[in-house]
Amino acid sequence: MNQKLVTVGRVMLALYFLLPGIMKFVSWDMHITLMETHGMIMAPQLLAAAAIFEIVAAIALLMNRYTALVSILLALLVVVINVSLHDFWNFTGIEAAHEMQNFIKNLGILAGLLVLAGHCGEKSKAKN
């Protein structure tokens, strides 16, 4: 039962990154505008890199390959996105509330990634 829950969680986390990775290409202009609104430089290059990484990382998670490493790298991406794009401290009113909600939601995703990385890291140590 425990392994089934880990598998379901891993697949759900993979989908969380796969679909937005694809949508970054589908809604390219919207994402560029969002990034530029937050003062990010080299927005097209960073967006392409993030989208490709999210798609490749999601596929790796779906295939259960390099799961601990991929989870750590995705966790780092979440931290960068959280600080760069969900900077609720720079807004007021409903905008601040919306960004804070996204920031806190991403902390939950970050926690899930860290738990997955820890679980997979322990699993691989047990095999050695």
Image (cartoon, rainbow, N blue to C red):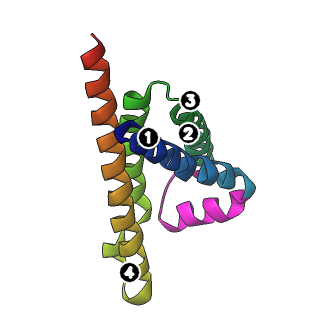
Q: Which residue shows up at 32% across the image and 59% down it?
A: 107
Q: Position of residue 82 (x, y in %)?
A: 38, 58
- Depth check, mark 1 against mark 2: the one in front is 1
Q: Which residue shows up at 40% across the image and 45% down it?
A: 5
Dot label at residue 58? 2
Q: CA distance from mark 4 to mark 1?
A: 38 Å
Q: Are marks 2 and 3 in contact (CB under 8 Å)?
A: no
Q: Circle 1 sits on which residue?
A: 4
Label 4, residues with CA under 10 Å away: few <14, some 14-19, many ≥20: some
Question: Element type at marker 3?
Answer: loop
User: Looking at the picture, which amino acid does disc 4 mark?
Assistant: Ala
Dot label at residue 96? 4
Pointer 2 or 4: first along the chain: 2
The reply, left or right, for residue 73 in relation to residue 22 is left
Q: Circle 3 sits on which residue?
A: 63
Label 2, residues with CA under 10 Å away: few <14, some 14-19, many ≥20: many
Q: Position of residue 87 (x, y in %)?
A: 36, 68
Q: Which residues are magenta?
A: 27-43
Which of the pair 34/103 is nearer the observer?
103
The reply, left or right, for residue 56 in relation to residue 127 is right
Question: Element type at marker 2?
Answer: helix
User: Looking at the picture, which amino acid does disc 2 mark?
Assistant: Ala
Which of the pair 88/9 is nearer the observer?
9
- For the N terminus, which image quadrant? top left
The reply, left or right, for residue 109 in relation to residue 35 is left
The reply, left or right, for residue 64 in relation to residue 82 is right
- For the C terminus, which image quadrant? top left
Label 3, residues with CA under 10 Å away: few <14, some 14-19, many ≥20: few
